[in-house]
Image (cartoon, rainbow, N blue to C red):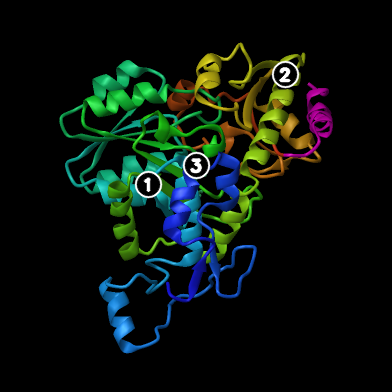
């Protein structure tokens, strides 16, 4: 990278970064400054890179000289995002991808082969379930799905060929949590890897690698972007594992756009502040709903009545920005709440400054069988809210428009 001057040289940067607190890393880790001396990080919107001579091109292509070749392989914007994420999750290396699903699939393609076995939580993002149940299955990787807070089910599902345990904590939409240290020990006793989807907490609230997980994956589309603009994903962990994903992705082409990478590393600069505010608003809304006569029960680990409360307190720095609640009644009553909001957006996305409201049974979880819905607690009277950063009193008034009609 002869034309680039790093903020400090990358090697120095690595050394300094490890002493920095989270907020400092989120703003400064991984920065690369070009010869133009820009203060805010540039966007490197380029597909390929040019060389001073034929000999230099040969050296870079052969890997004898450090440098970029083609943005499907590496790109400075993507590298800044990856290095910043690696610092924030406390991992050796990160690999960014075109979406959260591309990160999950890419990690699986890098690590797994035919006849390997996976154990996966039943309470994962719907498309994650599809990847394991349908597509990896098609290529001879079999998956057993378990109720994710039942540790005995994880142990019982273990086979000699089990290579990977996959889970998401807290779960969507009811906010159940699982003990990551215990799950890491269950995985490692059996020579398997533990991969954790950390999308709901982000490293600002939970750092699974520090609790023993081997790989963390993210949909950067959510809180990392933070404003609902760009699709992207990233995996973080030990270099030898992440390198496998990177090699696969270079070939498969699920690379992140440098423009999206730029949005993400700028988004990371405000991540802790935003997560604090999401947590504060969500707790206030959960407490208010918990007292509301039209509400039967609120599912949010920030409430002492929630089963996962103590564990979440221990394992997370905050309870997160997603809550669910059951209204008195059924689908009609839940829909009345959704149909009367004027501020909240009726959409299934999350991790945005804007609050979103959704009816899981008929949207995000509509493809589950009635039996699976019942098992996962996706009842007809359940409403999920991903709480944004609007004023909390406005949000309460917005819900009251529908709740007062029940
Ligand atoms: C959105 C999401 C994904 C998938 O990410 P995409 O960026 O949409 O591909 C995976 N896991 C969780 C928990 C998510 O919320």
- Reading the image, the residue beneath label 1 is 92
User: What is the x, y in percent for residue 135?
Assistant: 31, 48
Q: Which residue is mark 3?
A: 19
* Residue range of the region highlighted in magenta in the rendering: 389-406
Viewer-side label of 1, 2: 1
Label 2 with label 3: CB-CB less than 8 Å: no
- Judge by depth and name the residue closer to the eye, 365 or 351: 351
Sequence order check: which comes first, mark 2 or mark 3?
Answer: 3
Query: Residue 309, position in %: x, y?
Result: 56, 16
Marks 2 and 3, how far apart at CA: 38 Å
Element on which disc 2 rests: helix
Would you place residue 66 above or below residue 372 in this image? below
Q: Nearer the viewer, residue 87 or 380?
A: 87
In space, the residues marked 3 and 1 are separated at their CA atoms by 15 Å
The quadrant of the rendering that contains the N terminus is bottom left
Q: Mark on residue 78?
A: none
For the residues bearing labels 3 and 1, Cβ distance under 8 angstroms = no
Mark 2 residue crowding within 10 angstroms, few (<14) / some (14–19) / many (20+): some
Label 1 to label 2: alpha-carbon separation: 39 Å
Indicate which label's residue lies in the foreground, 2 or 3.
3
Residue 397 in picture, x, y percent from top left: 84, 30
Q: Is residue 30 left or right of residue 346?
A: left
Q: Single out the residue that lies furthest toward the top.
A: 305
Q: Is residue 399 magenta?
A: yes
In the image, is residue 303 part of the stretch drawn in magenta? Answer: no
Q: Which disc number belongs to residue 287?
A: 2
Q: Position of residue 374 (x, y in %)?
A: 48, 22
Which residue does the image show at 28% across and 78% down from the upper left?
59
């Amino acid at each position: 990278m002869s034309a680039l001057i790093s903020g400090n040289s990358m090697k120095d940067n690595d050394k300094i970064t490890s002493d920095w607190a989270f907020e400092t890393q989120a703003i400064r880790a991984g920065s690369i400054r070009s010869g133009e001396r820009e203060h805010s990080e540039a966007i490197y919107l380029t597909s390929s890179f040019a060389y001073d001579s034929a000999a230099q091109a040969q050296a870079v292509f052969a890997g004898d000289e450090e440098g970029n070749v083609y943005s499907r392989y590496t790109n400075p914007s993507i590298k800044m995002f990856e290095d910043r994420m690696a610092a924030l999750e406390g991992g050796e290396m990160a690999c960014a991808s075109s979406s959260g699903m591309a990160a999950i699939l890419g990690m699986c393609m890098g690590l797994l082969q035919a006849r390997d076995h996976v154990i996966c939580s039943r309470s994962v993002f719907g498309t994650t379930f599809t990847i394991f149940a349908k597509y990896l299955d098609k290529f001879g990787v079999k998956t057993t799905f378990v109720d994710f807070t039942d540790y005995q089910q994880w142990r019982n599902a273990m086979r000699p060929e089990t290579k990977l345990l996959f889970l998401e904590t807290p779960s969507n939409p009811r906010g159940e949590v699982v003990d990551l240290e215990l799950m890491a020990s269950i995985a490692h006793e059996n020579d398997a890897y533990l991969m954790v989807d950390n999308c709901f907490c982000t490293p600002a609230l939970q750092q699974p690698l520090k609790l023993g997980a081997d790989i963390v994956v993210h949909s950067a589309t959510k809180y990392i972007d933070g404003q609902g603009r760009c699709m992207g994903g990233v995996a973080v962990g030990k270099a030898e594992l992440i390198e496998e994903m990177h090699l696969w992705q270079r070939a498969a082409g699920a690379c992140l756009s440098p423009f999206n990478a730029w949005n993400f590393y700028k988004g990371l600069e405000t991540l802790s502040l935003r997560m604090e505010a999401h947590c504060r608003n969500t707790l206030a809304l959960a407490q208010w709903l918990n007292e509301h006569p039209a509400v039967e029960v609120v599912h949010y680990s920030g409430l002492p009545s929630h089963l996962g409360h103590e564990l979440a307190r221990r394992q997370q720095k905050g309870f997160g920005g997603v809550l669910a609640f059951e209204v008195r009644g059924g689908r009609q009553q839940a829909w009345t709440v959704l149909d009367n909001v004027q501020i909240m957006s009726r959409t299934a996305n999350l991790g945005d400054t804007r609050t979103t409201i959704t009816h899981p049974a008929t949207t995000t979880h509509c493809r589950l069988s009635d039996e699976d819905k019942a098992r996962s607690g996706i009842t007809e009277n359940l409403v999920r809210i991903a709480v944004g950063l609007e004023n909390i009193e406005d949000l309460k008034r917005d819900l009251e428009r529908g709740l007062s009609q029940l």
